[in-house]
Amino acid sequence: MQNEWNNGMNQYPYNGGDDGSDKGRKQFVLGLTIGILVTVLVALLTTGIMGLSRGLRQLEDIRAHKENTSGGSVTDTDVVRKLGILEETIQEYFWQDVDNATLEEGVYRGILDSLGDPYSVYYTEEELIALQEQTQGIYYGIGAYISQDVEAGYVKISGVIKNTPAEESKLMQDDYIYEINGESMYGKDSAYVVSKIKGEEGTYVTVTVLRTGVSEPLDIKVQRRKIESPTVEYEMYDNHMAYIQITEFDVVTSGQFEEALNQARSEGMQGLIIDLRSNPGGNLSTVCEIARMLLPKGLIVYTEDKYGEREEYTCNGQNEIDVPLVVLTNGYSASASEILAGAIKDYGIGKLVGTTTYGKGIVQKVINLSDGSAMKITVSTYFTPNGNNIHQIGIDPDVEVAFDADQYKAGVDNQLETAKQVLGEMMD
C-alpha cells in the first residue's frame, strides 16, 4: 500500500449520471452500492451469484475485520441473494445485452461511490497502470495536465506541456474534457479519463472539450506520443532572482528540482521564486524530499486517522534555504502543493503570493488487489506544522493578487511580476 497525495483537484470523483444508457447503468450501480464490499466471505460460499461471485473473491484480502460505524454488519445472505435476483432480472429484461464483467465492475465502483467521497475510487487493472505511469512522469499520451472539478462533474485541463501533441492540437488550459472517442466523461475520475486518453504510440484519440466562449463542444483529434513530463522548469532573472516552477510532484520531480536548485546556486542565486500555480499535487515522498531541501528542522506535515493515530513526516533542517523565498499559488494549487506551501508559510521562511489554494487536506491510500485491480480510499486528514487543517479551506497568500488574463495574453504575467516585486523588497 502507498500513500497518495495525488492530483488534489478533486481528481477522483464518481458523482453523477450521464444521459441515455450510461445513466441507466449508473442508476443500477447506485442501487447496488450499500454494503457490497463486506459481503465477500458470504460470496465465497454462495454459488447463486453467477458472474458476481468471481469478482467479489478478488476483494477477500481487504475484507473489513471490524464492524462498521453503525454498529452492525451487512454481511447477510439476503444481500447476496438480492444481488443474484438483480442480475438475473437485468439479464432477462434489460433491453441490451450486458456482460458479467460490466456488472462486476459496476458493483466495485458502486461500493466506493456509496461513501460519498470523491477521492475514494475503484481502479481496473488498466486504470491502475495508467495511474502508475502518470506518477512516474513518463508515458504515452498527449501531454496535458488534468484535474477534477467536482461541481462541474468533468475533468479539466489544468495545463499543457510545451512541444507536445496537446499544444500542437490547440488544447487549452481550462478546457473541460466532455468526451473521449465519443464516450461521455461526465462523473468520471481523472484516472479513468487518463486511461482513455493514453494508448499506443502513434495512434490518435479524439478529445471533445467544452471551452469558455464557445457554444458547441469542440472535437480535437490528437496523436499519442511518448511524453517525458518536465515537471520542473528553471530560469534566472535579473538581480540574481531564480525562478523554479513545479508542475506536479511525480517520482522524477525531486531530482529535477534538486538539479534546478543547484544550478541556481551555481549562478549566484540571491532570491528564489517557487511557482506552484495549477500544481494539482502528487507523491507524498516527493514533496517531502523537496521540503527537506528548503525547510528548517521540524515537522513537514502530520496526519491523523479516525482512530486518532498520528503519523509525522519530518525534516532534519540540514539544507534550510538561506535566501529570501516567495511561493506563487492559486486556486488550482492542491494537495502536495499545499503541503509545501503550508510548511513554508508556517515556518515563516518565505511569503506566499497569488490567491488562496484549493484546500485538499485529506490523504488516500492505494490498496492493490490480487487480480491487478486496486481501490483508493481516503484514510486520514493532514495538518500543516502549526496544526492547521486546510481541507475545504485552503491556504491564504501573504500578498493577494488575482490573475489577469488580459495582461497574460499581452505577454505579462501579473502574478509573477508581483512575486518579483515582493522578492526584490525581501532581498533589499
Image: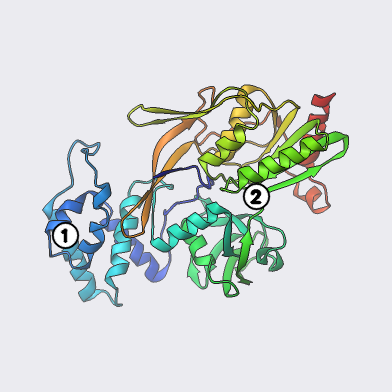
Q: Secondary structure at mark 1?
A: helix
Categorize mark 2 by other alpha carbons within 10 Å: few (<14), some (14-19), many (20+): many
Q: Quadrant of the C terminus?
A: top right
Image quarter of residue 105: bottom left
Circle 2: residue type: Thr
**Residue 231 in the image, given as x and y percentages of width and height:** 65, 49
Question: Where is 320 relative to 50, above or below?
Answer: above
Q: Kindly check if marks 1 and 2 are in contact, taking CB atoms under 8 A apart as contact.
A: no
Residue drawn at x 79%, y 25% as measured from the top left: 426
Residue 18, picture quadrant: bottom left
| Kind of residue sitting beneath label 1 | Lys
Q: Position of residue 175 (x, y in %)?
A: 62, 59
Q: Which residue corresponds to the image point at 19% horizontal and 52% vertical from the top-left? A: 39
- Looking at the rendered image, the quarter that the N terminus falls into is top left
Residue marked by disc 2: 231
Nearer to us of marks 1 and 2 is 2
- The residue that appears at 62% across and 46% down in the rendered structure is 253
Relative to 325, is 378 above or below?
below
Crowding near the residue tagged with mark 1, few <14, some 14–19, many ≥20 C-alpha atoms within 10 Å: few
Q: Which mark is residue 82?
A: 1
Comes first in the chain, label 1 or label 2: 1
Residue 411: percent from left, percent from top: 83, 51
Element type at marker 2?
loop
Q: From mark 1 to mark 2, how far is it between C-alphas?
A: 49 Å
Q: Residue at x 60, y 49 (%)?
A: 252
Residue sitting farthest toward the right: 238
Image-based side of 291 in relation to 268, left or right = left
